[in-house]
C-alpha cells in the first residue's frame, strides 16, 4: 500500500539529482502515462517548474494557496505542506514525479518529505567533470536545455570544479542515506551508463530495469517515448569541451584526482551509502558542510 | 495613490540583523557573506543594525561592514521605518537577549537565527538562553524561526537543551570564505633548515591562549633559535596572563581590521592553541590559515572540524612535529595541498546565495534596479528622520561649526536639526538647516538653577516634538537641564561629542558621561601633550581623527581663492582671526599684530571677523580687508600665513590646510587649553606660539619670522606631511550608524523608574 492511498492523495516519486545530469531528458522519457504526472523542479527558487504544462493542477493549487505568488511562496517556505497540497490536488490513484536539486529544500524538510510522503526515489548521477562542464556552459548561455553548446569553449578552474563536485557528492550521499533510512524504494540511474546511449530502445531497456523497484505505471518507463531533448554538447572527449582541457587534465593528475573527476558518484559516494558501508551523516541541504 | 504606496512597507529580499560592532568572527563572517551577495545583481540586501547589550563601549561598526554601507549596495533599515523581507538572518543570539526597546522596522517571512557561539562554554556555563532569544524574535520580528548553528561544536552544545521548540537546521551555517581573496602559492618551497616562521592571529582575548605559560611556551616555541613566532592580536594582556616577559623570538602586533592575508602569507606554519575553558565555535582563523595552504598545527579537539587538513598534537609535540615535517619536502608540500584542498572543497563556491535559496528565498529573476535597491517607491512618502544637534557655545562658534562638519556629511534620510546656545546660530539656518535657539543663562542674566529647569523643559519639548533618531550634544559643560531632559528619554540614542584639552576646572563634567549612550572624542593633533581630565577616560570613548569642517581637498584652488579676495600675485596674504574677544582681551594684540604685519609692504591682511564680534576699527589701510564670512576656510588657499587663536577648529583647519600660523592662544579660564595646542605646534616646527600676556614683547620678531619666505616654506613642507584628517567623515558615519541602531541593550527594568 502506498502512502498516497493513506493520504487520499497522489503517490510521490522524487528524482534527486544535481543540475546538468540529464534530468530533463530523463523526465521526458517518463512522460506519457495518465497515471504519472511528471513535474519538474517544484522547489526551484525562481518558480514552481512543471506546473505551466498542467493548467488544471496549477489553477486548483492557486485557488487553494492564494494565487500564483502564494503557490511559489508556499513551495519555497513550506515545502512539505505545499507538496501535500499538490498531491491532494492531483488526487489518489495517481503518482506525481518531481525533481529536487541541491539548494532547493533544506535538510529537515527534505528528510520529512522523503520519510513521510515519498513512495520512492531515483538518484540520477553523471560523470563529475562532464556534468560540471555542462553546468559552466549553461551558466554561460543562461539556457538550461535544448541549446547546442558544442561551440562554447569556456575556461574551467580546478578549484571551482572541486568545490562544486564536493558539494554534489555530499548532497547525493546525504539524500541517498535519507532514502535508505526511510526505507523507501530507491532506484539509481546514471547518465553515462543508462541514458547517454545511441539507441533509444537501449535507453528504455535500461530504464525499465533500473526503475523496476518503483512500481511505476506500466507505460511510464520510457519505452517508445521520443524525447524532444537532445544532447547539447557533441564533443566526445570531456577535456576537449573547454578551453584549458590539457591544463586541467595535468592539474587533476598532479592532485591525484583524475579518476575522481572522470567518474560519477555511482562509483564511490552514493555506492557506499546504498550498500550500507557509509555511516556518515552528511548534510543534505545545500551540499556545503 | 502616492499616499497609499507610502503606507506599504518597502521590500528587500534578505536582511542581516546584527550588532555590527563586534570586532571578531561574527562581523567578519557577515562581511564575507555581504561581499559575496553584493555581486548578485538580482538580490536586494538590507541591514538592521542592533545595539545589543554585550558591547557597552562605543565601538564603531566593523569596517568591512561599514564599507558595504558606504557603497550604498546595502539598504539600512532605520527605526521608525517599515520594511518587509523574505528572510531575516539574525547573526548571534546576543542580539535578541533582550526585547527591542521599540518596534522593529522590519517584518520577515522567516528568521534564521545563526548561532556563532556555543550555548555553553567548556565549563558548562550557559552563554545565552536560546528559548528566551527565540521568544524575543517571535514577539518582535517573525513567528517562523529556524535556528542554525555555525558548526558541530555549537550544535552539540544545544543537545542538552530542549526548552526551545524552534527547529534546528540540519545544515550548519558555516562561515563563508571567498577563496579568491585567500591566494594559495602552490609552488612555495618548504622553509630552509635554519629558519622557520610560525604564527597565529586572533582577537586579543586571554581565552584564545593556553591557560598555562608552560603550554604557551611549548606551543609557541619560546626562545627557540631559528624560529620566529608572529602573533597578530597580541598585547599587554599576554604578559599579564602569563606573568612573564614575552620571549625575544615572539613578534607581537596589535589586532587590526586590516586584511590578514599578508600576515598569513609571511608564515610557514600556523599554530593555534587556546584555553581549556574556551570552546571554539568554528575557528575562522584556522580556516583562513588552511585556505592559504599553511601547515597547521592544532590541538586534537579540532580534528572533528578540520580532518586531515591540519596536524593535531599537544603543545610538547609542536616542535618535533614541525621539524620532522620540514625535513621531508614532499610531506610538507602534501600537507599544504591537503589544507588548501580542504578549503576548496568546503568554501570554494558561492554558497551564500544557495544557502538563502535553501531556506526559502524566492528569486524574481529581475535585475536589481536602482529604485528596487533603494526600496522605492514605497519610501517615497516617507520623511527623513531628524538628528538633533544640541550645543553650547557661549562665546564662539566652535561647537556649532564642528556639528556642521558632521551634519553636512550625513547620508540622505537623516535631517540635521540644530538647537544651540550659540549667538551665531543663523549660520546653520543660512545653510538650510532648521534651527532652535536656546539662550545661555549669561545672555539672559538668569539664575542658573532656574534656567536649568527651563532648559530641561525646552529640550524635552524638542525631543518630544522632533522624535529624533539621535541627539548629538557638543560642548564641554553638560548642564543639569540637559542631563535631566535626557533622563526622560532613556531609549533615545544620545551622543556626547567631547573634545580633549580640558582644564582641571572642567573635571566635574566627566560624571556627565553616564547621561549619554555614548561618548566620542574628536582627535587632537596635540593629544600627546594633553594631560587634562579626559586623557585617562580615552579607553572608554570612541576616538576619531581630527574633525575639519572643510576638507583641504575641497577648498577653492589658490588662484580662485585669491581672486575672491582681489589679491595680486605678489601679495603676502595673512589671515588674522582673533575670535570674538568676548572672554579674552585681544585688542592690544590685534593692534600690535596689525602694525607689525602692515610694516611689510608686501603684506595684505585679511581679518576674519567673528560673527559675534563688532567690526573692529582701523587702522585705515588699503592693505587691510575686514571680512565676515562662513566658512572662511573655503578660501584658505589664498593665504600665505595666518595669525590667530588656537581653538579646536581654527587650529586644525589651519595646520591641516597647510597654512603657516602664528598662534595666539585664548587663555580664558573657561576655554580648553589652547596654549597646549599652540606650544605643540611650535615645538614640532609646525607653527609659532605667542602668549598674549607673556610674550607680547616678542610679537614683532615672531611676525618677522612668519613673513620670512623660507621659514614659511619649511613649515608648509612639514604640514603637508601630516596625516589627512578624516574625523568628520568618520563621525558622520558613526552618527548615521548609531542613529540606525534598534536597541536591545537594555532590559526593560533598566529603562524607567518603577
Image (cartoon, coloured by chain):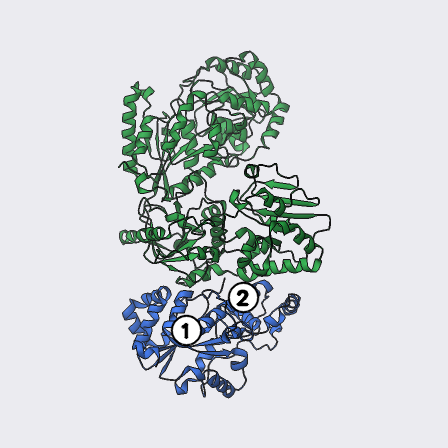
Chain colours: A blue, B green
Relative image position of residue A72 (x, y in whole percent)? 35, 66
Q: Earlier in the sequence, mark 2 or mark 1?
A: 2
Q: Position of residue B224 (x, y in %)?
A: 68, 44
Identified at 45% across, 88% down, the residue is: A224
Q: Mark 1: which secondary structure?
A: helix
Give the quadrant of the C terminus of chain B. Answer: top left
List x then y, in percent, for residue B291: 58, 56
> Which quadrant of the view contains residue A285?
bottom left
> Observer-nearest residue: B200 or B593?
B200
> In the rendered view, would you say B582 is above or below B84?
above
Q: Quadrant of the N terminus of chain B?
A: bottom left
Dots 2, 1 in contact, CB < 8 A: no
Disc 2 to disc 1, C-alpha distance: 24 Å
What is the x, y in percent for residue B581?
Answer: 43, 18
Residue at the spot of label 1:
A182
Numbered disc in front, either 2 or 1: 1
Q: List the residue tagged with mark 2.
A: A166
Amino acid at each position: 500500500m502506498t502512502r498516497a492511498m493513506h493520504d487520499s492523495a497522489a503517490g510521490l516519486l522524487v528524482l534527486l539529482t544535481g543540475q546538468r545530469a540529464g534530468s530533463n531528458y530523463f523526465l521526458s522519457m517518463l512522460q506519457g502515462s495518465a497515471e504519472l504526472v511528471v513535474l519538474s523542479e517544484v522547489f526551484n527558487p525562481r518558480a514552481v517548474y512543471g506546473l505551466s504544462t498542467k493548467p488544471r493542477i496549477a489553477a486548483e493549487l492557486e485557488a487553494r494557496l492564494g494565487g500564483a505568488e502564494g503557490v511559489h511562496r508556499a513551495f519555497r517556505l513550506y515545502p512539505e505542506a505545499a507538496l501535500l497540497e499538490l498531491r491532494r490536488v492531483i488526487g489518489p490513484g495517481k503518482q506525481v514525479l518531481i525533481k529536487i536539486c541541491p539548494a532547493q529544500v533544506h535538510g529537515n524538510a527534505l528528510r520529512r518529505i522523503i520519510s513521510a510522503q515519498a513512495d520512492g526515489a531515483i538518484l540520477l548521477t553523471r560523470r563529475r567533470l562532464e556534468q560540471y562542464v555542462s553546468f559552466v556552459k549553461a551558466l554561460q548561455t543562461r539556457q538550461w536545455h535544448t541549446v547546442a553548446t558544442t561551440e562554447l569553449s569556456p575556461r574551467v578552474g580546478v578549484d571551482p570544479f572541486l568545490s562544486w563536485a564536493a558539494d554534489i557528492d555530499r548532497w547525493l550521499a546525504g539524500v541517498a542515506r535519507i532514502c535508505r533510512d526511510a526505507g523507501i524504494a530507491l532506484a539509481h540511474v546514471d547518465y553515462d551508463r543508462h541514458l547517454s546511449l545511441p539507441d533509444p530502445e537501449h535507453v528504455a531497456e535500461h530504464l525499465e530495469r533500473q526503475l523496476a523497484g518503483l512500481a511505476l505505471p506500466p507505460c511510464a518507463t520510457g519505452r517508445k517515448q521520443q524525447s524532444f531533448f537532445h544532447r547539447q554538447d557533441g564533443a566526445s572527449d570531456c577535456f576537449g569541451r573547454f578551453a584549458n582541457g590539457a591544463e586541467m587534465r595535468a592539474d587533476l593528475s598532479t592532485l591525484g584526482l583524475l579518476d575522481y573527476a572522470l567518474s560519477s558518484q555511482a562509483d564511490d559516494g552514493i555506492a557506499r551509502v546504498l550498500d550500507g558501508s557509509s555511516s556518515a551523516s552528511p548534510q543534505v541541504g545545500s551540499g556545503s558542510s | 495613490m502616492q499616499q497609499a504606496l507610502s503606507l506599504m512597507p518597502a521590500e528587500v529580499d534578505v536582511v542581516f540583523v546584527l550588532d555590527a560592532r563586534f570586532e571578531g568572527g561574527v562581523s567578519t563572517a557577515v562581511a564575507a557573506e555581504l561581499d559575496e551577495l553584493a555581486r548578485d545583481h538580482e538580490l536586494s540586501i538590507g541591514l538592521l543594525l542592533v545595539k545589543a547589550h554585550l558591547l557597552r563601549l562605543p565601538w564603531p561598526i566593523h569596517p568591512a561592514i561599514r564599507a558595504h554601507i558606504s557603497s550604498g549596495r546595502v539598504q539600512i533599515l532605520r527605526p521608525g521605518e517599515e520594511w518587509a523581507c523574505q528572510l531575516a538572518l539574525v547573526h548571534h543570539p546576543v542580539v535578541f537577549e533582550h526585547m527591542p526597546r521599540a518596534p522593529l522596522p522590519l517584518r520577515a517571512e522567516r528568521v534564521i537565527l545563526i548561532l556563532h557561539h556555543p550555548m555553553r562554554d567548556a565549563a558548562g556555563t550557559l552563554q545565552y538562553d536560546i528559548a528566551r532569544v527565540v521568544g524575543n524574535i517571535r514577539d518582535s520580528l517573525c513567528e517562523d524561526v529556524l535556528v542554525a548553528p555555525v558548526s558541530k561544536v555549537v550544535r552539540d552544545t544545544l543537545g542538552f537543551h530542549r526548552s526551545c521548540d524552534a527547529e534546528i537546521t540540519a545544515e550548519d551555517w558555516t562561515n563563508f570564505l571567498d577563496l579568491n581573496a585567500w591566494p594559495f602559492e602552490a609552488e612555495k618551497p618548504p622553509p630552509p633548515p635554519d629558519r622557520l616562521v610560525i604564527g597565529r592571529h586572533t582577537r586579543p582575548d586571554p581565552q584564545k591562549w593556553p591557560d598555562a605559560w608552560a603550554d604557551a611556551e611549548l606551543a609557541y616555541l619560546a626562545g627557540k633559535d631559528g624560529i620566529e613566532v608572529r602573533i597578530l592580536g597580541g598585547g599587554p594582556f599576554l604578559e599579564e596572563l602569563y606573568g612573564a616577559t614575552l620571549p625575544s623570538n615572539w613578534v607581537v602586533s596589535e589586532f587590526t581590521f586590516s586584511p590578514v592575508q599578508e600576515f598569513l602569507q609571511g608564515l610557514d606554519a600556523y599554530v593555534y592553541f587556546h584555553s581549556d575553558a574556551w570552546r571554539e565555535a568554528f575557528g575562522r582563523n584556522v580556516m583562513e590559515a588552511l585556505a592559504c595552504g599553511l601547515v597547521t598545527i592544532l590541538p586534537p579537539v579540532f580534528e572533528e572540524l578540520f580532518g586531515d587538513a591540519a596536524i593535531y598534537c599537544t603543545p610538547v609535540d609542536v616542535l618535533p612535529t614541525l621539524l620532522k615535517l620540514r625535513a621531508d619536502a614532499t610531506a610538507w608540500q602534501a600537507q599544504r595541498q591537503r589544507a588548501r584542498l580542504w578549503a576548496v572543497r568546503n568554501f570554494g563556491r558561492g554558497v551564500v546565495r544557495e544557502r538563502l535559496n535553501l531556506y526559502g528565498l524566492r528569486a524574481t529573476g529581475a535585475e536589481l534596479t536602482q529604485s528596487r535597491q533603494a526600496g522605492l517607491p514605497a519610501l517615497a512618502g516617507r520623511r527623513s528622520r531628524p538628528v538633533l544637534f544640541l550645543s553650547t557655545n557661549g562665546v564662539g562658534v566652535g561647537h556649532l561649526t564642528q556639528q556642521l562638519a558632521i551634519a553636512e556629511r550625513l547620508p540622505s534620510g537623516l535631517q540635521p536639526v540644530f538647537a544651540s546656545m550659540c549667538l551665531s546660530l543663523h549660520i546653520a539656518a543660512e545653510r538650510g538647516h532648521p534651527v532652535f535657539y536656546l539662550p545661555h543663562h549669561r545672555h539672559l542674566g538668569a539664575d542658573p538653577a532656574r534656567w536649568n529647569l527651563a532648559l530641561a523643559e525646552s529640550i524635552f519639548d524638542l525631543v518630544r516634538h522632533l522624535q529624533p533618531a539621535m541627539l548629538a550634544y557638543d560642548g564641554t559643560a553638560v548642564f543639569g537641564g540637559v542631563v535631566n531632559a535626557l533622563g526622560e528619554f532613556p531609549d533615545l540614542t544620545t551622543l556626547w561629542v567631547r573634545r580633549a584639552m580640558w582644564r582641571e576646572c572642567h573635571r566635574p563634567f566627566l560624571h556627565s558621561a553616564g547621561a549619554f549612550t555614548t561618548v566620542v572624542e574628536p582627535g587632537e593633533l596635540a593629544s600627546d601633550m594633553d594631560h587634562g581630565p579626559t586623557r585617562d577616560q580615552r579607553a572608554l570613548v570612541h576616538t576619531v581623527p581630527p574633525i575639519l569642517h572643510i576638507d583641504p581637498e575641497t577648498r577653492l584652488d589658490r588662484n580662485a581663492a585669491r581672486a575672491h579676495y582681489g589679491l595680486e600675485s605678489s601679495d603676502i596674504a595673512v589671515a588674522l582671526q582673533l575670535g570674538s574677544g568676548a572672554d579674552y582681551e585681544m585688542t592690544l594684540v590685534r593692534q600690535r599684530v596689525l602694525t607689525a604685519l602692515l610694516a611689510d609692504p608686501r603684506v595684505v591682511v585679511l581679518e576674519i571677523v567673528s560673527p559675534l564680534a563688532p567690526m573692529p576699527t582701523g587702522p585705515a589701510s588699503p592693505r587691510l580687508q575686514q571680512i565676515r564670512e562662513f566658512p572662511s576656510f573655503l578660501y584658505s588657499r589664498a593665504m600665505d600665513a595666518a595669525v590667530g587663536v588656537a581653538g579646536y577648529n581654527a587650529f586644525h583647519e589651519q595646520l591641516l590646510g597647510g597654512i603657516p600660523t602664528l598662534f595666539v592662544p585664548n587663555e580664558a579660564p573657561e576655554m580648553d587649553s589652547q596654549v597646549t595646542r599652540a606650544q605643540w605646534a611650535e615645538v614640532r616646527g609646525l607653527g609659532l606660539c605667542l602668549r598674549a600676556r607673556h610674550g607680547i614683547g616678542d610679537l614683532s620678531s615672531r611676525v618677522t619670522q612668519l613673513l620670512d619666505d623660507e621659514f614659511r616654506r619649511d613649515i608648509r613642507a612639514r604640514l603637508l606631511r601630516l596625516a589627512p584628517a578624516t574625523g568628520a567623515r568618520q563621525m558622520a558615519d558613526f552618527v548615521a550608524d548609531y542613529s540606525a541602531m534598534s536597541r536591545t541593550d537594555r532590559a526593560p527594568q533598566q529603562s524607567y523608574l518603577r
